[in-house]
Image (cartoon, rainbow, N blue to C red):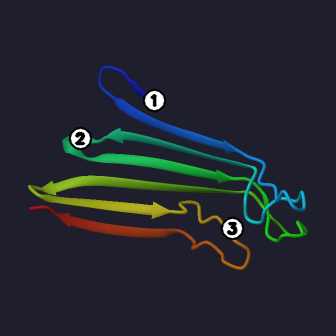
Amino acid sequence: MPLADRDTLVSVRASTTWMLPTDVGTGLDLPNRPRQAAALALSTALPHGGSITAAAVLVGARFADTANTVTLPAYLAVGLITRVPVAAGITASATIQNLFDARYEPVQGYPAPGRTIFVEIVLQR
């Protein structure tokens, strides 16, 4: 759903999931499957052909085991990415994942990395 005014174009992407991840044999929740999840991304163009995007993913609490006795808490992960043309055929990008250095485990025993920064230079022919 793009929102635009005379000088600025902002692209908005959003999604949400509501589910009942139930094991039909036991009636318990399936492990590592949240009942709710949502994502939001906002993008805009920068001068001279660049862009910047902010994205957030919210994952609800979920059980880590088939007996539904261990709960993993909900988490929010936020990231930024910017792309800028440097010269003809050369684009630079920088990505920050887990911007706020959130501590969470997507799966029990496997913690997500802390804040991570990637820089990329792409050469196009």
Q: Nearer the viewer, mark 3 or mark 2?
A: 3
Instruction: Tell me the tag on residue 66.
Output: none
Q: Please say if the residues under marks 2 and 1 sit with CB atoms less than 8 Å apart.
A: no
Spot occupied by residue 64 in the image (x, y as percentages of width and height): 79, 69
Measure the C-alpha gap from mark 2 to mark 1. 22 Å
Badge 3 marks a residue whose secondary structure is loop
Residue 2, position in %: x, y? 41, 29
Q: Which mark is residue 1?
A: 1
**Earlier along the polypeptide chain: callout 2 or callout 1?**
1
Residue designated by label 3: 104
Residue ID at (40%, 61%): 95
Give the percent coordinates (x, y) of residue 72: 78, 65
Query: Nearer the viewer's eye, disc 2 or disc 1?
Result: 1
Residue 39 or 120: which is nearer the viewer? 39
The quadrant of the image that shows the N terminus is: top left
- Seen at 57% across and 73% down, the residue is 113
Which badge, 3 or 1, is on the more N-terminal residue? 1
Q: Position of residue 119 (x, y in %)?
A: 33, 68
